[in-house]
Image (cartoon, rainbow, N blue to C red):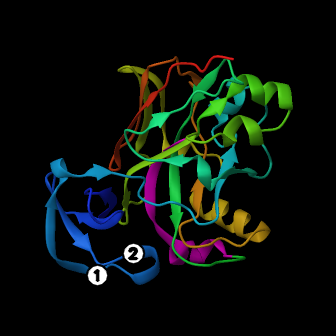
C-alpha cells in the first residue's frame, strides 16, 4: 500500500492511498496517529502536488558507513557497530522540492538511501520484534556538504541544513527489503548503484541498535546508509534516487548561493 501526503490547494496537507498510477483514495487523517481510514473521496494524482510523505515530529536517525564499498571510497574501515548521527526534522523536504545550496559550502553531495518509517513509540526493540514498529519504507537522499564535513570533523552541520533530507514520493507499507537495486542518477547519468543486501548491518540490527540508545516516535525516520558512488551534485542539476519497488524520488539542486 502506497501512502501519500499531498496538497490539493484547499485542505492542506492531506493523506491518501495511491490506488493506481492516476488516482488517490483520500484518508481521513494522518495514518501514523489515527490509522488508515479511507473516505469516500478520490482525487487525481495529476491535480495534486506530492509532499514529503511524513514530517518527523522528532528526528531523522542516519546510519554511516553501512555499505562496505562506500566505507572504502571514504578511506575508512567498516565499523564494528552501526555509526549513528541525526539530521534535524527541518531538513526534510518532499519530491520535486528544491535542494538549497548553502552559501557556506562549495561542494554538495548526493547519497541515495532506503528510509525506515517508524510506526509507534518504541525503545529497546529486539531484532525479532522490529516489524512491530515499522510503518513502511520510503526513499531518501542524505544530502551532504562534503567540504564542511571534512572541516568540522563531525557531521551535524554538513548534513543538517534545511532541505538536506529529501524523502518520498510515498511510504510503501508492504515493502520487504531484500536484494532490490538502489540507484542514484544526476541528470540521467547513473552515479550510485548497489543492492539493499549489501548493507553491513541489516534492518533488524539497525532498529535494535538505535532503540538501545534512544526512544523513537511515530514518524521518526532511520536512513540506512548509502552505497559507493557518492559525489558532487552540481548547481541546477536534477538528482534521482530509485529503489526497485519504491519508485523514484526526484529533486533539483539550486544554483550555488553566493557569499
Q: Secondary structure at mark 1?
A: loop
Q: Quadrant of residue 118?
A: bottom right
Q: Above or below — where is 159 with respect to 129? A: above
**Neighbourhood count class around disc 1 (C-alpha, 10 Å): few under 14, some 14–19, many 20 upward:** some
Reply yes or no: does residue 131 show up in magenta. Answer: yes
In the image, which residues are magenta? Answer: 125-141
Q: Above or below — where is 189 with respect to 144? A: above
Reply yes or no: does residue 228 show up in magenta. Answer: no
Residue 177 visible to the viewer: no
The spot of residue 222 in percent (x, y) is: 60, 57
Q: Above or below — where is 224 with respect to 104? A: below
Q: Quadrant of residue 110?
A: top right
Disc 1 vs disc 2: Cβ atoms closer than 8 Å?
yes
Residue 157 visible to the viewer: yes
The spot of residue 226 in percent (x, y) is: 58, 38
Q: Name the residue rendered at 70%, 77% in the picture.
A: 123
For the N terminus, which image quadrant? bottom left
The spot of residue 80 in percent (x, y) is: 80, 48
**Neighbourhood count class around disc 2 (C-alpha, 10 Å): few under 14, some 14–19, many 20 upward:** some
Q: Name the residue rendered at 66%, 35% in the picture.
A: 68
Q: CA distance from mark 1 to mark 2?
A: 8 Å
Quick one: 83 or 60, which is closer to the camera? Answer: 60
Task: Give residue 31's mark.
Answer: 2
The spot of residue 114 in percent (x, y) is: 50, 48
Identify residue for label 1.
37
For the C terminus, which image quadrant? top right
Dot 1 or dot 2: first in sequence order is 2
Amino acid at each position: 500500500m502506497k501512502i501519500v501526503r499531498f496538497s490539493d490547494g484547499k485542505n492542506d496537507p492531506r493523506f491518501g492511498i495511491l490506488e493506481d498510477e492516476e488516482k488517490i483514495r483520500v484518508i481521513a487523517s494522518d495514518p501514523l496517529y489515527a490509522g488508515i481510514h479511507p473516505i469516500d473521496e478520490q482525487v487525481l494524482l495529476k491535480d495534486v502536488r506530492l509532499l514529503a510523505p511524513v514530517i518527523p515530529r522528532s528526528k531523522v536517525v542516519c546510519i554511516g558507513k553501512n555499505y562496505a564499498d562506500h566505507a572504502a571510497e571514504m578511506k575508512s574501515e567498516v565499523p564494528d557497530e552501526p555509526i549513528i548521527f541525526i539530521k534535524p526534522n527541518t531538513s526534510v523536504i518532499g519530491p520535486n522540492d528544491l535542494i538549497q545550496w548553502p552559501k557556506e559550502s562549495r561542494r554538495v553531495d548526493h547519497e541515495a538511501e532506503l528510509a525506515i518509517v517508524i510506526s509507534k513509540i518504541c525503545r529497546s526493540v529486539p531484532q525479532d520484534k522490529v516489524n512491530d514498529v515499522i510503518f513502511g519504507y520510503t526513499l531518501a537522499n542524505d544530502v551532504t556538504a562534503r567540504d564542511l564535513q571534512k572541516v568540522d570533523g563531525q557531521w551535524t552541520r554538513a548534513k543538517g541544513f534545511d532541505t538536506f533530507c529529501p524523502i518520498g514520493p510515498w511510504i510503501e507499507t508492504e515493502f520487504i527489503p531484500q536484494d532490490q537495486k538502489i540507484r542514484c542518477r544526476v541528470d540521467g547519468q547513473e552515479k550510485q548503484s548497489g543492492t539493499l543486501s549489501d548493507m553491513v548491518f541489516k534492518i533488524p540490527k539497525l532498529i535494535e541498535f538505535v532503540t538501545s540508545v534512544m526512544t523513537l516516535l511515530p514518524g521518526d525516520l532511520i536512513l540506512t546508509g548509502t552505497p559507493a558512488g557518492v559525489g558532487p551534485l552540481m548547481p541546477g542539476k536534477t538528482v534521482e534516487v530509485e529503489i526497485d519497488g519504491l519508485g523514484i524520488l526526484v529533486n533539483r539542486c539550486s544554483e550555488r548561493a553566493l557569499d
